[in-house]
């Protein structure tokens, strides 16, 4: 594709993304990220998460709980992947949605049983893309990007070491 419509899909700054992509190709460290977040207990099962001046409440009566937030993060990440890469290849998006579900059992979480982990056993998801026209080759490309490029999807698909330091006073 010789030219990319920088306004093809609402709010995606394709030009800036392509410039960033070129910088990363020249120096992979430009893609490094190491976020540090802080969570503070708000009472009950609610936590206030802070990152770089932004805040998010997880848990409690009026918010997504941690497991729902995990699915939400996965959905948001793949929406970003699909919309960005669709823009790169000139696919106009009329509608894009992702539905995700997963099964988990909380026995271990509540301490009711000595059972293996209480995390998701599997996650299933469906991407629905409405577009004026798309080729099978473009669909295959977007599927491949979801399977290979999604940071949240990649994290969920493999074992990530957790290193706990517990400080009490």
Image: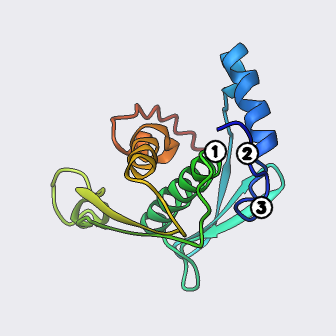
Q: Mark 2 to mark 1: distance in Å? A: 7 Å
Q: Position of residue 4 (x, y in %)?
A: 73, 45
Q: Secondary structure at mark 1?
A: helix
Q: Which one is in front in this view, the residue at disc 2 or the one at disc 1?
A: 2
Report the side of 100 relative to 95 (left or right): left
Q: Front-most of 80 and 115? A: 80
Residue 95 seen anywhere in this rendered image of the structure: yes
- 110 up-or-down from 61: above or below: above
For disc 2, the neighbor class at 10 Å (few under 14, some 14 to 19, many from 20) is some
The answer to whether mark 2 and mark 1 are in CB contact below 8 A is yes
At horizontal 49% and vertical 44% (from top left) the residue drawn is 150
Q: Which mark is residue 11?
A: 3
Q: Which residue is mark 1?
A: 88
Q: Which residue is mark 2?
A: 4
- 42 up-or-down from 149: above or below: below
Q: Secondary structure at mark 2?
A: loop
- 39 up-or-down from 126: above or below: above
At horizontal 18% and vertical 50% (from top left) the residue drawn is 116
Q: Position of residue 45 (x, y in %)?
A: 51, 73
């Amino acid at each position: 594709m010789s030219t990319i419509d920088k306004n093809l899909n609402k709010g995606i700054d394709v030009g800036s993304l392509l410039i960033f992509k070129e910088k990363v190709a020249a120096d992979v460290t430009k893609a490094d990220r190491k976020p540090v977040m802080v969570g503070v207990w708000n009472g009950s099962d609610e936590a206030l998460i802070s990152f770089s001046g932004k805040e998010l409440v997880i848990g409690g009566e009026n918010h997504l709980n941690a497991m729902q937030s995990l699915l939400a993060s996965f959905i948001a990440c793949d929406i970003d992947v699909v919309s960005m890469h669709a823009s790169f290849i000139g696919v106009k998006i009329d509608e894009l949605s992702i539905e995700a579900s997963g099964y988990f059992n909380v026995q271990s979480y509540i301490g009711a049983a000595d059972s293996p982990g209480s995390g998701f056993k599997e996650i299933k998801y469906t991407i629905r893309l409405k577009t004026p026209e798309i080729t099978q080759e473009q669909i295959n490309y977007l599927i491949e990007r979801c399977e290979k490029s999604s940071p949240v999807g990649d994290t969920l698909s493999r074992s990530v070491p957790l290193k706990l330091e517990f400080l009490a006073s």
